[in-house]
Image (tube, rainbow, N blue to C red):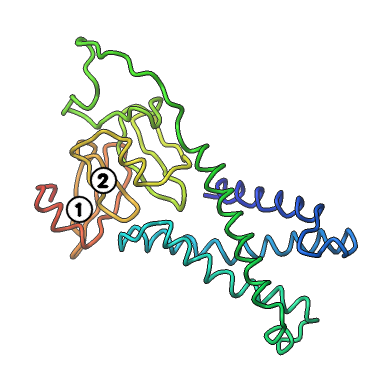
Amino acid sequence: MIKAVSIEIFIVLTLGVLLGLIGPFGTFEMSAGVRMAFWLGTFLMGYTIFRPFLIVSEWVGETLRVPQLVAGGLALMIAALPLTFLIALFFAGFDAARALTGKGLIGLYLQVWLIGFLVNAVFVLTLGRTAKPTETVTAMPNPANPPASANASGPSQSTRLLPDLGPVYALKGEDHYIRIYGAAGEQLVLMRLRDAITDVQDDQGVQVHRSWWVSRTAVASVRRIGRTAELTLVDGTVVPVARDMMPRLRELRWL
């Protein structure tokens, strides 16, 4: 997770330096040092404010089945409000009354929203593309070596995700990333959880928690904890089960 945040902050700082050099929205009239400090500070504040809103919007989108474009758009609109006020406060000499009654407040809000939208687009385009594996040509199956999806004795093999990890035991969502637990170890990858679940060919696998998908054949033991449970996988990984998933697991006879 630290590595993931470090990458995002690096991109934010790079964009801040770029706008500090260009000086858009009338900031080029500032001195070079003040302009650079302004844009770097603005981008860091924006990341601190926008990031939690986008994380919550992703959770709301997945939980309520709201399209991510709609949930993310609303999150950007809300997150732009406090950042707009902070920037207006800076230009008003830290006079809150002047900041809130300034004539250009609406225009400033639109600029903040636009920059927030563009930065988020950069994250989606750059990090999203990095997360997607390279397309490969699928060879005709060898009867002597049937594909993993046809083998019911062990966890399924992903066709595109991370074949070097072998059979996939579980997937854990960590913000915009997923942690893949496989026979050969684990690895953090830039990808949405639902995309990774689709990528793993395992009809017996179930999403047992908002952040966890587990292959049935990777479950070594189940421990009941009140109204919920914990799954221990063959590699020792412990996976929590959400309370609302308990009926589903009972139906599938996992419990």
Residue beneath the point at 72% across and 83% down: 102
Q: Which residue is mark 1?
A: 223
Residue beneath the point at 80% across and 65% down: 26
Rendered location of residue 133, percent (x, y): 45, 31
Asked if residue 65 lies left or right of residue 132, the reply is left
Q: Is residue 219 above or below residue 153?
A: below
Rendered location of residue 92, percent (x, y): 78, 81
- Label 1 sits on what residue type? Arg
- Label 2 sits on what residue type? Thr
Residues at badges 2 and 1 in contact (C-beta under 8 Å)? yes
Rendered location of residue 156, percent (x, y): 25, 31
Measure the C-alpha gap from mark 2 to mark 1: 8 Å
Q: Which mark is residue 231?
A: none
Rendered location of residue 218, percent (x, y): 24, 37
| SS at badge 2 | strand
Q: Which residue is mark 2?
A: 232
| SS at badge 1 | strand
State the image quarter where residue 157 is shown.
top left
Residue beneath the point at 14% across and 54% down: 248
In this orientation, which residue lies closer to the viewer: 136 or 77? Answer: 77
In this orientation, which residue lies closer to the viewer: 180 or 59? Answer: 59
Residue farthest right in this picture: 31
State the image quarter where residue 99 is shown.
bottom right
Residue beneath the point at 32% across and 30% down: 158
Asked if residue 165 lies left or right of residue 81, the reply is left
Q: Residues within 10 Å of mark 1 (few under 14, many from 20)?
A: few
